[in-house]
Image: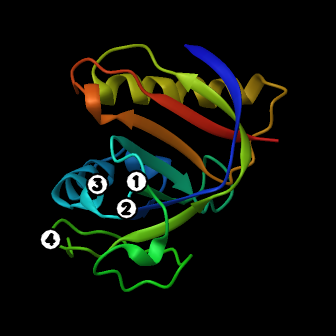
Amino acid sequence: MNTYFVEKAKMTLAGVSIRTTNEAEMGPDGGLSQLWETYFQSNIAGQKATVNPEYIYALYTDYESDASGAYTVVIGHEVAEERHLEGSQLEEGELEESQLEESELVENQFTYAAVPESKYMVFKTKKGPVFEVVAQAWGEIWAYFKESGEVRTYTGDFEIYDSRNFDPADTQVEIYIAIE
């Protein structure tokens, strides 16, 4: 897996969210696949305030502790200003932490999350089936940080998917891990 370092400015994402753990996601109670379905049923990319709608973000934030604790996942897009999203009922900067159920999709009810300015170590996956290469990459990332001198900050890690050339059977994803 290729890696490189980059510094990124603060950004705001709008999307759909779920609170989960790695343990839950490895078992039958995992909710990320349903969250992706909810994202694809929404019209987040079509909102006027969306910046670069071709880039889909999967943000891991609001960590309880580290990779073993609970965290929030937000799947969505970068937005210019939160309050410009149509139909939103959240205040600027507020992060909704409700658990999404299969039948709970509420149109135009989005979660907002601030991604802090940070230094990131970027892991570029190999090409292949999306769920396979992303799961494999996270396994390699966890193993890397157990042995590395780099220190994760757990302030906001994210995956970027480029929808312009997205093929679920043969894709490549970049995973940004916030470090000190």
Q: Residue 24 appears at what percent x and percent y?
A: 41, 52
Residue 96 visible in the picture: no
Q: CA distance from mark 1 to mark 3?
A: 7 Å
Considering the numbered disc 4 on the image, is that residue within a helix, a strand or a loop?
loop
Task: Left or right? Give the position of 49 relative to 2.
Answer: left
Cα separation between marks 2 and 1:
6 Å
| Structural distance between the alpha carbons of marks 4 and 1 | 22 Å
The quadrant the N terminus occupies is top right
Q: Quadrant of residue 84?
A: bottom left
Secondary structure at numbered mark 1: strand
- Please state which amino acid type lies under the numbered disc 2: Gly
Residue 36 seen in render: yes
Comparing labels 4 and 2, the label whose residue is closer to the camera:
2
The residue nearer to you, when weighing 32 against 127, is 127
Placement of the C terminus among the 4 image quadrants: top right
Looking at the image, residue 86 lies above or below residue 49? below
**CB contact under 8 Å: marks 1 and 3:** yes
Q: Residue 176's spot in the image, x, y percent?
A: 59, 36
Q: Which residue is mark 1?
A: 77
Which of labels 3 and 2 is toward the front?
Answer: 3
Q: Is residue 43 above or below residue 8?
A: below
**Disc 3 residue type (three-letter):** Ala
Task: Say which of 117 and 169 sits in front.
Answer: 117
Q: Earlier in the sequence, mark 4 or mark 2?
A: 2
The numbered mark at residue 103 is 4
Q: Which mark is residue 15?
A: 2
Q: Which mark is residue 45?
A: 3
Residue nearer the viewer, 73 or 70: 73
CA separation in Å, label 3 and label 2: 9 Å
Q: Position of residue 92 (x, y in %)?
A: 53, 80
Q: Please state which amino acid type lies under the numbered disc 1.
A: His
